[in-house]
Amino acid sequence: MDEAQSVVMGISGADIALAAKYVAAGLCMGIGAIGPAIGEGMAAAHALDGMARQPEMQGALLRTMVIGQAISETTGIYSLLIAIVLLFVV
Amino acid sequence: MFEQLAGLLTHLGEKRIAVLNLSGFEIRFDVVYLLMSWIVILLLIGLALLLRRGLRQAVEEKPTRTQAAVDALLGLLKTQLSDNFASERLAVMMFPFIATLFLYVLLSNWISIVPYLSSPTQDLNVTFGLALLVFIVSHVLAIRHKGVRRYLKGFAEPYPFMLPINLVGEIAKPLSHAFRLFGNVLAGTFLVTVIMAKFLPIALPPVLNIIFGLFFGGIQAFVFAILAVAYINVAVED
């Protein structure tokens, strides 16, 4: 009903802005998640290499890996914040 | 569909702001997260008092279960601190601060698995307050360890023209520290709420709560504490 009406009456600027907001939030999160995902995967892969070579270092490697992953996750968190701001604040 | 989802999410972001008017000064705070913070603090104090009762016994006796559990937790924290701090003296000195930070963030993250309670750490003000605390502690310790001259000179290292970059780097530390915890906890809450309300309200919530509440909450609390250690360590050493 609403959609049919808006098609008949024409789409206003506010509709376009709303649509752009959702598209931008989706793009922001989708593209922003690529970097941290690759980075965390690399950290885990190299930590696994190290653990396979030296199993006695497992504790230290695991700790360093988790911290490194949490730090490389930061950029993903930033894009999440931007997405939230786009959805609920702007 | 979009509007329903947005309406679902905004009740999470809705602020119940109380305004305290002190003769011209306006202090605004969110009542819910203030209450949650106090619940977490009272829980921690209560747990500490409860556990302390179980510890009153002679050394040669066999340790009770509570004693073994508390020993294991404190031992884990202690080894982590002495592994990560530059000097043993610093590790002993900072142990109460870091342990308190860790336990508070851990319980704050875990409390959201109880229905009708929400994590205080999903409010940016709480995490930013904690990060600011770490920032102030690290810089005060740096001044005490190095002296004012060497501390100020540290900003112009390795070359004087790097001063703006060093300053921005110092300011970015508490910001990223706060945003990391806040974003992780908020994202977990969003996911759990959306999936609970939209898809499978019967079977999934326990699993999701274990993953997002207990597992990620625990990791983020650990990371928060370890990063606090790292920031203090970097600020203190040359």
Image (cartoon, coloured by chain):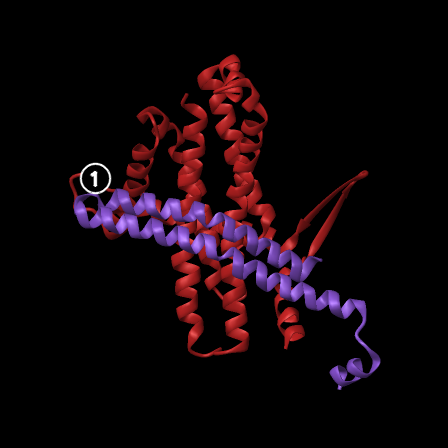
For residue B45, say whether it is visible.
no
User: For numbered disc 1, what is the local secondary structure?
Assistant: loop
For the point 21% across and 39% down, which residue is it? B58
Residue A38, compared with residue B146, is above or below; it is below
The colour with which the image depicts chain B is: red
For the point 43% across and 74% down, which residue is it? B204
For residue A19, say whether it is visible.
yes
Q: Please state the horizontal and vertical placement of residue A40, each as a whole percent of the image.
A: 39, 52
Can you identify the residue that label 1 sits on? B58
**Outermost residue toward the right?**
A9
Q: Chain of mark 1?
A: B
* A11 relative to B93 in the view: left or right: right
Q: Please state the horizontal and vertical placement of residue B60, each as a whole percent of the image.
A: 15, 39
The colour with which the image depicts chain A is: purple
Q: Dividing the picture into quarters, in which one does residue A9 lie?
A: bottom right
Q: Amino acid at mark 1?
A: Ala
- The residue nearer to you, when weighing A22 against B123, is A22
For the point 31% across and 37% down, which residue is it? B78
